[in-house]
Amino acid sequence: MVVSFIQLLLQKIEPMFWTLELASYLEEAPWPATKDELIDYSIRSGAPIEVVENLQELDDEGTEVYESIEDIWPDYPSQDDFMFNEDEY
């Protein structure tokens, strides 16, 4: 019982953790979208529970509109971050 209580507390303390894989589930989301719309989309599209949990941890009152994944995860890498030259292909 004590262990499960401690685990519950630790879950509440852990910050959002985004990876490229988790963020990729939001690439086709209906941008712009509110927090609730993104959570609904994530559930309907079968995204991992970590995506839903990360979205639930966003600090807003449900009225803020997010234009893209960069609004949620500012460090999301853009095409310019990769050393890929499209002209070569």
Image (tube, rainbow, N blue to C red):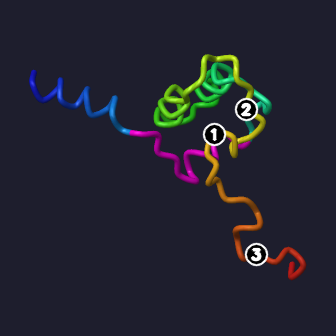
Task: Examine the structure image and report whether residue 23 is included in the region drawn in magenta.
Answer: yes
Identity of the residue furthest to the right in this view: 87
Between disc 3 and disc 2, whose residue precedes?
Answer: 2
User: Which secondary structure lies at badge 1?
Assistant: helix
Task: Examine the structure image and report whether residue 66 is included in the region drawn in magenta.
Answer: no
Q: Quadrant of residue 81?
A: bottom right
Between disc 1 and disc 2, whose residue precedes?
Answer: 2
Label at residue 84: 3
Name the residue that disc number 1 marks. Answer: 72
**Of residues 82 and 88, which is closer to you in this image?**
82
Name the residue that disc number 2 marks. Answer: 66
**Of residues 53 and 45, which is closer to you in this image?**
53
Query: What is the magenta range?
Result: 15-27
- Badge 1: few (under 14), some or many (20 or more) residues near its Cα, within 10 Å? some
The location of residue 30, given as percent across then percent down, is: 78, 30
User: Which secondary structure lies at badge 3?
Assistant: loop
Give the main secondary structure of the magenta stretch: loop
Give the spatial CA distance, label 3 vs label 1: 25 Å
The location of residue 10, given as percent across then percent down, is: 27, 34
Give the spatial CA distance, label 3 vs label 2: 28 Å
Report the amino acid beneath label 2. Answer: Tyr
Q: Residue at x 61, y 29 (%)?
A: 42
Q: Between label 3 and label 1, give the one nearer the viewer.
A: 1
Q: Is residue 84 left or right of residue 38?
A: right
Q: Between label 3 and label 2, give the one nearer the viewer.
A: 2
